[in-house]
Amino acid sequence: MYGAAEGLSRRFAAWLGLHSTDATAVLEIAAAEERGTPLSPARLSERISLSTGATTALLNRLEAAGHITRAREHSDRRIVTLRSGGHIQERADEFFGPLAHRLDAAMSHYPPQFLEQFEAFMAALNTTMDSHLTEQDAVTPRPLRTPDGRTP
């Protein structure tokens, strides 16, 4: 499933004429907006695993192309909120809409109770992975060592 999701992401990026990292950033920004929790540049940096400097360069490119905007909506004017350009949602709907119809058709073959159980299972997996990542944030990584004990 991960491979299919990666393939969709790369194809969407090519369809938009963007680098895959840029398209991933645009999708993260749009998805966060849909959830009602828009991203800051720092949070986006964490989500797409880029340094803050690389994220700034990426945001400069996306803003110059009109794909995103940076807004100061908070009472603390230092806080920057990222918003997707209006055309991005339209383009995403155009690209992913046919997939949504296919997924709806595939899911229609299963009873609602099964889908609810599957959704609960996936949510539990996600929560478990998030908890593990949170715990790992508190752990200092041990240096990697070769079999003879040397640090590479």
Image (spheres, rainbow, N blue to C red):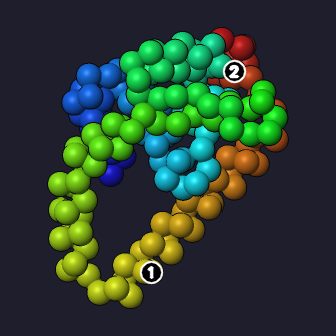
Element marked by disc 1: helix
Front-most of 55 and 149? 55
Name the kind of residue labelled 2 in the image. Answer: Arg
The percent position of residue 17, horizontal first and vertical second, equals 26, 22
Which residue position holds label 1?
A: 117
Determine if residue 4 is in view. no
The percent position of residue 138, horizontal first and vertical second, equals 82, 41
Q: Tell whether 110 sits left or right of 124.
A: left
Quadrant in which residue 57 is drawn: top right
Q: Tell whether 143 sits left or right of 88.
A: right
Residue 139 is labelled as none
- Report crowding for label 2: few under 14, some 14 to 19, many 20 or more residues within 10 A (C-alpha): few
Name the kind of residue labelled 1 in the image. Answer: Gln
Q: Tell me which residue sits at (42%, 75%) in the image.
A: 118
Mark 1 or mark 2, which has the lower sequence index? 1
Which residue position holds label 2?
A: 145
Determine if residue 122 is in view. yes
